[in-house]
Amino acid sequence: MNHAEILACVDHTLLSQTATWPEIQALCDDALKYRTASVCIPPAYVKRAKEYVGDRMAVCTVIGFPNGYSTTASKVFETRDAIENGADEIDMVIHVGALKNKDYDSVLNEIRQLKAVCGSKILKVIIETCLLTEEEKIKMCQLVTEAGADYIKTSTGFSTGGATFEDVALFAKHVGKEVKIKAAGGISSFEDGEKFLTLGASRLGTSRLVKLEKAGS
């Protein structure tokens, strides 16, 4: 794969707590220039960013981020608010504690409720793989599939680890055929990005690949 093909799969991301509007604007400009799949930004900037990019770029935002332990009702509100502000794609964080409690119905129903709010818009489910056992990762592949979400996503990038080749390969083996995979967190080279895509990912959550492309151009 060439760099342009890999960049077309990137959710160009800036989720720092200190992110300013000029930084978000620059992120959008770079995403447009390098034709990434989307920009992934904090909810507070969605409305302004969507007004800035219009239909030229998909705007993705995060819900229940980064810990995932807010209530389902609050996640539903966040999701509806984000979509009303112009978000095209939603990346939600599951309640990891509920999964570890084996409260699978709760996890499933939460994803279903957010997908109902999203409708035809893309919902990605962040399961924070670095905190899970292999059994829990496989269970989440099943729940994400059953809930009708569009993607399963490895990581927030804010916990103890990011995407691994092993986790993406595990997802590809266990997720339903209609569910896509997003690898996020710690993707630092085009070689790694290509390997994630080869293993079965369709999206890459990163800011580094655009920075590398800019540095090399």
Image (cartoon, rainbow, N blue to C red):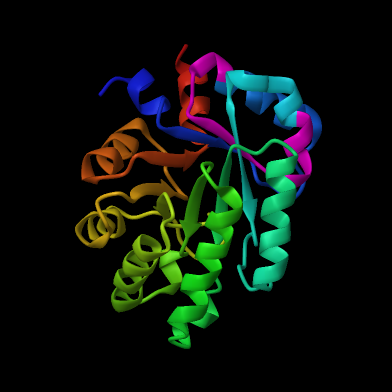
Place of residue 45 in the rendered image (x, y in percent of width and height, measured from the top left) = 76, 38
Expressed as whole percent of the image width and height from the top left, the position of residue 196 reads 29, 43
Which residue is drawn at the image coordinates 70% and 51% (left, top)?
80
**Rendering quarter of residue 104:** bottom left
Position of the N terminus, as image quadrant, is: top left
Residue 25 occupies quadrant = top right
Relative horizontal placement of residue 146, taking residue 25 as reference (left or right) = left
Q: Relative to 210, does residue 173 appear above or below in the rendering? A: below
In terms of depth relative to the viewer, which is nearer, 115 or 214? 115
Nearer to us in this view, 129 or 160: 129
Q: Which residue shows up at 62% across the image and 67% down it?
A: 67
Reply above or below: 85 against 116.
above
Q: Which residue is outermost to the bottom?
A: 101
Residue 106 painted magenta: no
Q: Residue at x 51, y 72 (%)?
A: 109
Tell me if residue 112 can be seen: yes
Q: Position of residue 99 (x, y in %)?
A: 46, 79
Q: Position of residue 191 (x, y in %)?
A: 29, 34
Is residue 89 toward the left or the right of residue 52 in the image? left
Using the image as rendered, state which of residue 155 and residue 188 is in the foreground.
Answer: 155
Q: Is residue 99 visible?
A: no
Against 106, residue 76 (above or below) is: above
Point out the residue furthest to the top here.
217
Q: Which region shows up in magenta?
A: 32-48
